[in-house]
Image: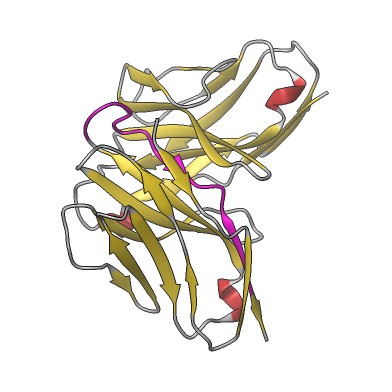
Amino acid sequence: EAQVTQNPRYLITVTGKKLTVTCSQNMNHEYMSWYRQDPGLGLRQIYYSMNVEVTDKGDVPEGYKVSRKEKRNFPLILESPSPNQTSLYFCASSLSFSAAPWRDEQFFGPGTRLTVL
Amino acid sequence: AQTVTQSQPEMSVQEAETVTLSCTYDTSESNYYLFWYKQPPSRQMILVIRQEAYKQQNATENRFSVNFQKAAKSFSLKISDSQLGDTAMYFCAFFPTSGAGSYQLTFGKGTKLSVIP
């Protein structure tokens, strides 16, 4: 089954304790990205990656790191989490935004609910 | 930076009726895609429909259609024959493929749609 998986789905942690949220896709997609969703703000892109070893900042990259060593994995790293990073996080992947059929190309993971105390 | 504006935080519609959700965006680019995503209470992000900026014809997907006005930078979503399962948050999103911010997906803040039996 084609899917994007995220782990963990729920996480409660404390300020300053490094954490990693994993994201993996099994569709050989080139483009992967991370978003955070906050009430009243919609989804905001944190980082994205066009392919292996290529990453770029989105709109809200401060306090986050990513890596893309393999095509299927795109972990999100919070080196020193703070309470303002409490949010719902989504990973997403797509083959290409120009190829068809487009409906089969864009997948979001189920989300990770992170609480930083 | 690109901006996407959804001016209706909440809307409601009677079952079987038609509703239109509005979205405007601001860009100087000519090459881009526009999307509507649906987020039901399960929090899963589901791609509803997409429009390529170079296409003049409005996209349609079953009961969902868009009114794309490129000069006005407007991209509204029309849902016909509304069903209870359409109850969700709807996000408009913009994805440029050229210029500054290319390949960054920018979302609006969302419109909460309730379908009333």
Q: Is residue A2 visible?
A: no
Q: Is residue B27 visible?
A: yes
Left or right, A95 with reference to A111 = left
Q: Quadrant of the C terminus of chain A?
A: top right
Q: Residue furthest right?
A: A117
Left or right, B49 with reference to B85 = left
Residue A57 horizontal/vertical position (percent): 42, 21
Quarter of the view holding residue B61: bottom left
Q: Residue at x 66, y 45 (%)?
A: A40
Against A32, residue A63 (above or below) is above
Q: Residue at x 50, y 24 (%)?
A: A75
Left or right, A42 with reference to A95 = right
Residue B92 horizontal/vertical position (percent): 45, 53
Residue A20 horizontal/vertical position (percent): 60, 21
Q: Which residues are magenta?
A: B98-114
Residue A17 horizontal/vertical position (percent): 74, 12
Q: For residue B30: magenta?
A: no
Task: From the viewer's side, name the closer residue of A41 and B117.
Answer: A41
Task: From the viewer's side, name the closer residue of A87 and B54.
Answer: B54
Task: From the viewer's side, name the closer residue of A33 and A39.
Answer: A39
Q: Residue at x 19, y 49 (%)?
A: A99
Q: Residue at x 64, y 58 (%)?
A: B42
